[in-house]
Amino acid sequence: MNKPASDKNILRRVFGVPYPFNWGYSVLFAALGTALVMGLAKLVFDNGLIAFSTSSTVGCGLITALLTTVALMLPAVFIPRKSSPDISGRYTGAGTLVMSFLSGSAVFLVRASLRNICTYLWLRIGNSVVFPALFSYAADDSKATLVLQVLTDTFIPALGISVFFYGLLWSGIRNADQDLAYYVIPFLFCLYSMNFPDLPGLFITGVWLCRVRKDSGNVWGPFLCLSGSRLFGLLLTGVIDEADLTTLRTYSDMPTTFFFSALPALVVAVIIFAFFRKILGEFHNSYNADVYGEEGSKYSVGDDTHRIDRFRAGFNIPFFMGVIIFIGLWVLMFKGIRL
């Protein structure tokens, strides 16, 4: 007689917002939002309901804005209403934000260099180009097109990525477990990107953003870092450029100048990362010493549980369901079934 109630309790326990909040719960919502937006976009664009292609600047921008809103921003808005995690963080001063922005230069150097090298090696062993799930091709080089591209491929995604991965997910990991976040969050960041050519660069970017999030103390550090990366890329146009996948068929289509600039750029990026790691760490230590004294900052929940228990709580059923959905989307992308 009590079985329906029991089943309801099981569903509530598995899919209800956990308390204390854990990092794995939100992955399912991001995966469902991504699948929903991609399915809707395919339906709308394939039926000609919008007079743009998905690879046009406008079409890709519309999908990106909708994807960021549904998959990343909505979970970050509605989930905290149930569990109240600390998403935005705390303001630690303008210095950390400026340093976070400037560290975007190293992020760009790493992503551009690794994209060029990995794309060449992938084509060199006889494979074909694997386009990201979302990409755009601009037919003209007008200023309006450039502004629209920067807005839709940088600022909008950067806001969603910072709020979701380095706000919502980060808030579900206790202070004592944050070293483990350097593996989990970059992995999930890469999984969400559905961008095969940039995978190595994205993972390194995800690791660095964890560092920026920790030292800056808020989500605006990662946002400014990602924004700075794109802006530094514009400044370095002609010095080091990312390979245009739409122009490649074989490895011989890649200019040799990509390799003359890629390896030195990686060396410079390592030096820049080391510099900003030290600077941001000093800002972080100074702020904590001034505000918290010797105790440092602590999260208000979960500190009385064992370290492995706090982190392991994120490996739950919703997390694995979300990962399975993302893997399915990756398989479709590799099979050429895309927007």
Image: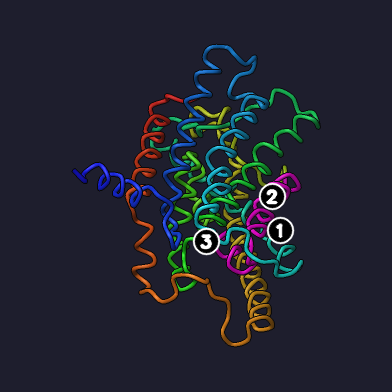
Mark 2 and mark 3: span between their CA atoms?
A: 22 Å
Q: Residues within 10 Å of mark 2 (few under 14, many from 20)?
A: many
Residue 40 image point, x, y percent: 51, 24
Q: Contact, CB < 8 Å: mark 2 with mark 1? A: yes
Q: Residues within 10 Å of mark 3 (few under 14, many from 20)?
A: many
| Quarter residue 4 falls in | top left
- The region drawn magenta spans 207-236
Q: On residue 227, which mark appears?
A: 2
Three-letter code for the amino acid on which mark 3 is drawn:
Ser
Q: What residue is shown at x 53% (from left), y 12% (from top)? A: 47
Q: Secondary structure at mark 1?
A: helix
Q: On residue 101, which mark appears?
A: 1
Q: Secondary structure at mark 2?
A: helix
Q: What residue is shown at x 66% (from left), y 66% (from top)? A: 90
Mark 2 and mark 1: span between their CA atoms?
A: 7 Å
Point out the residue furthest to the top here: 48
Three-letter code for the amino acid on which mark 1 is drawn:
Phe
Q: Nearer the viewer, mark 1 or mark 3?
A: 3
Residue 35 image point, x, y percent: 45, 32
Q: Nearer the viewer, mark 2 or mark 3?
A: 3
Q: On residue 171, which mark appears?
A: 3
| Quarter residue 145 falls in | top right
